[in-house]
Image: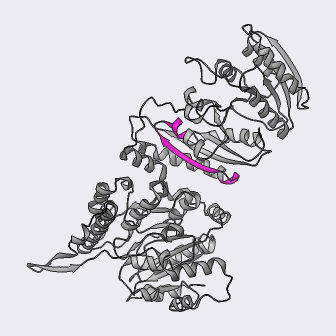
Amino acid sequence: MPNGDRSVLIVVTNSTDLESLLPFAQAAFESFASRIVILGLVAVPESESLTSGTLKARSLREAVDPTARHIGARVLVCVAHNIWRELKKTVVNEKCSALIVSRADVPPFEWLNVLPCEIIIAKPPFSKKNPRILLPIRGGPYAALALRLALSLAQSQNGQITALHAISPADNGNGEKHYQDLLRNLRGLPQVTRWIKARGDPVNAIVRAARTHNLIVMGANGSPRADEPSVGPTAASVLNKVKIPTLVVRAPQRLPAFLVRDPAPKPIDHTISVVVDKWFAENTFHAHEFQDLEQLVQLKEEQGLTISLGLPTLNEERTIGKVIKTIHAKLVERYRLLDEIVVIDSNSTDRTVEIAQSLGVPVIRHPDILRQYGMWTGKGEALWKSLSVLRGDLIAWIDTDIANIHPRFVYGILGPLIREPRLMYVKGFYQRPLRLGRRLEARWGGRVTELVARPMINLFYPELSGLVQPLAGEYAGRRQALERVPFFAGYGVEMGLLIDLFSQYGLNAIGQVDLEERIHRNQSLMALSKMAFEIIQVVMQRVDKAHHMDLVNDLNKSMKLIRQARAQFQLEVADIRARERPPMVTLPEYRAWREYSKSRTEKKPPAELVATHNSLLVQGAVQ
């Protein structure tokens, strides 16, 4: 194969493909600095929603991930009605110079003809030990490519090549001329040790010669007829009849790009429904995909990532101790997935702070952070200010009222970010039982999500309608994204982050992960009513901003709450305003601190940073 760096695509449609194709790829490109990308293709019938491929996509991803991590390859999984269009898109986006596909998954000729890379069609298995390579030369357009591949395999595997020229009775002499041209080049190659010339049916000649060889490398037919196999009748017959491993190669068309058009028997469906279905199928993960923590830590370290976990608290004395102990034992002591855990407290009046400090975890009251910008109440305020304290490249937040805490709540939301560089933000979702007295109802939780958040999203941001739980409190993101978006101070923080990150980075930068079940303290209907009111304000503010309207300023910011006291109803007025903080990166103190943290060249940080961070309650929370 040609010298230089290569990007090689291995195309798989089932869990066994990679095991059989990888040896071919490693042998063919062993002597070159090749980057391997593994593409899993999941085909869904046009009559079905793309979401029906979700479980198959997850299963395929889980099957190839271990091998991919072992060889340092990237994994992409695409779900589509037309998988060949996805194949070409990947070849272009990944700048692939070659692809390897199983003979069972060969694209139709019209798609083979527009793929802008070399194509290797493989019939496994492959043996690396001293291959005796049969190289049929028929004078076709891909004979030179077949020769280069055979030479590459012979050189890397200490093999020998037999050149076979099978002359068809219908040959008008052109084949003989091409063969003579190649023959002059072959004579000086030490890897070519034998020459065979046979007349008659080429397929029979190749099958006979194959009995004394253990690998065939040959070119495909350049222009098969419409009723013939996409690789041509000769190559297809050889693949069917021989029992030894076979590689059929095809070079890209040397035509101007505007002449190489995609086949389009049907228009491409870009409707919102299809876009969302495709996103759901390709970007929905499960926590158990990331439960191999040793490998997850290794991948984190290979990328040089640091990871922080922020725990927002307000009167969580019943659960905070178990949350810290569970996460610290597994993800700090046993596996160094987390580089720090910090509690960001909102002036708890119970024993929350005392319990956290007794367990050796830094506790910072969010009113003490960035005091010069004042203090607002709310979870979003605590999360926004925590960005100036937490040091990680990846930042995860989980709620601290989780009664059934498990490490999966943390590694589940971090895993996709560590594995998938394209992702900027990952939301958790789960079953949310509703506690009715002493009884748990399995699917009655998430009332604001189903009655307010999801309907609003479907109305105004339908691209986000595939998010199972947009208001979930367990999520993680890359600092580079989180520091560039505003944070709403109160209940609207989750909705605001989701809309703003989508607007800035696009749908495919967002993932979601199934965390199974979450049991927590359910809020009263009154509290949920306030939450819903604020979330509606957040959505309307973003709609205003997107469409350059001024509706929000005219909206009512107070809400009348109805309380029943004994035998009568009372009206109470609550002032509920969706206040937002600017992107953290716009603060000069934050930018200066980040620059200092990155360089560490100064003996002391700038004086204003010392003043800001000395206000933290725990020595060493920020170093």
Looking at the image, residue 61 sits to the left or right of residue 372; the answer is right
Give the farthest residue toward the left.
567
Considering the image in quadrants, where does the C terminus appear? bottom right
Location of residue 271 (image quadrant): top left
Rendered location of residue 102, percent (x, y): 63, 33
Rendered location of residue 452, percent (x, y): 27, 62
- The colour scheme used here is one colour
The answer to whether residue 187 is seen in the rendering is yes
Location of residue 124 (image quadrant): top right
Point 79% across, 17% down: residue: 208
Point 79% across, 30% down: residue: 147
The answer to whether residue 516 is seen in the rendering is no
Point 18% across, 80% down: residue: 573
Q: Is residue 559 magenta?
A: no
Task: Indicate whether 484 appears above or below 168.
Answer: below
Task: Indicate whether 575 appears above or below 187.
Answer: below
Looking at the image, residue 244 sits to the left or right of residue 560; the answer is right
Task: Indicate whether 78 appears above or below 195.
Answer: below
Rendered location of residue 95, percent (x, y): 63, 45
Q: How many marks?
A: 0
Q: Which residues are magenta?
A: 69-87
Point 77% across, 38% down: residue: 1
